[in-house]
Amino acid sequence: MRPVVLAVAATMLIATTYGLARFGVGLFGPRLAAERPAVAGGFGLAASAQFFAYCLAAVGAAGFCDRRPGPGVVLAGLTATAGCVGIALARDPWLLVAAAFVAGLGAGFASPALVRLVDARVAPPLASLVQATVNTGTAVGLVVAGLIGFAGWSIALTWLVMAALCTLSALVPSRSARLASPSAGTVAASGRTRPGPSEAGAARALLRPASAAVLVGLGTALVWSYGPLILDGAGTVASPDVAWLWIALGLGGLLGPTASLLADGLGTTRAWRLLCGLLVVALLTLILAEQTGQAWWAYLAMAVFGFAYMSMSSTLILIARQSRPTGAAAATSTLFVALALGQSVGSLGIQTLLDQTGPALATAVAAACCAVAGCLLRRSRRS
């Protein structure tokens, strides 16, 4: 399969498993609350369940996806589809939480499988760019989700359509995965019972990036889980226009492939710090939008957030691949699990802050988490 075809197919799988199945609850939160008031009480736990499910799937997929990415791709499509169907049918808070959990599994299977697949099928000079491009599939999915939101369908039909897209997106990557057999060296390496010194060093090298990823997860959970609800509740963005928030975020995120250019020009550490700084700017702008009631500030905040977040997650992939070139899927899973773990905890913690202190202070705390994350990484020869 040509690199461009693989890049498009893999991008579509990320678009559906992340942009639709995983983050759709945040986008359609106001619609869910309006059409099914009984499920509104489960939003915070559902958001946390999605992120926690991602952690479980990514951890479980890390080992076998380095050797056989095909099953990971298939599981990504199946779980994302099943989760979307479950949300379409959920009329009870606990059913919503359960369905959101299943939907969150899809993204956890997709990321490590596609990292391994791209590395196996794309030559090294293009691999970094393709990895960054595939990672911005989330942005594509957010734009698609926003456009679906404007269709005016019922919430049940909306999620059933997204379920169908999740199924279709897994077909081409799963076929390519069957053709991507690991090299003998990789298989031999995976069979060792004890990690070598270089692997132990790589694990230590991931400690600081993982800690930084947890903090970024804590901060960014506010936008993913509650952004539309906060702005809709404050009257900053009218309910019919909430989908524009996700479209603005997605359009900003489409610039995510520039992360490889930033890393090449600045080094991964400086690029990381810059992107964390932009996340802080986006969150502070969100406060301005909520306080002034000006919708344009909200759209600007979401666009900056989209660019910074997608580029930041692409940078995490680059850090992972630098640390463990022969185990990129496992390293990527480690950092993405750290990010999702922070988001899982953050979704619950931010809900408490929103209830007790209001959106302004909750958003300021989220911004502080991103600021601290930007200071954690140390410069190294490879960064």
Image (cartoon, rainbow, N blue to C red):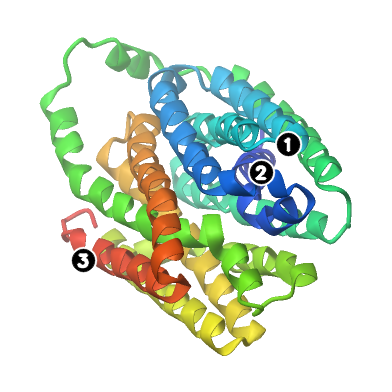
| Mark positioned earlier in the residue sequence (2 or 3) | 2
Query: Which comes before the other along the chain, label 2 or label 1?
Result: 2
Which residue is painted at 24% across and 65% down in the image?
372
Circle 2/circle 1 CB separation < 8 Å: yes
Of marks 2 and 3, the one in the foreground: 2
Secondary structure state at the residue bearing disc 1: loop
- Residue closest to the eye, 82 or 58: 82
141 over 177 or under it: above or below: below
Residue 375 is marked as: 3
Question: Up-down: is 201 above or below 188?
Answer: below
Of residues 64 and 187, the one drawn nearer to the viewer in this rendering? 64
- Residue indicated by mark 2: 39
Q: Is residue 176 visible?
A: no
Q: The disc labelled 1 sits on which kind of residue? A: Arg
Q: Which of marks 1 and 3 precedes in the sequence? A: 1
Number of residue marks = 3
**Mark 2 and mark 3 residues within 8 Å of each other at the beta carbon:** no
Q: CA distance from mark 2 to mark 3?
A: 39 Å
Q: CA distance from mark 2 to mark 1?
A: 6 Å
Q: Residue at x 28, y 17 (%)?
A: 189
Q: Picture quarter containing residue 379?
A: bottom left
* Tag 1 residue: 91
Q: Is 164 left or right of 288, judged from the image as shown? A: right
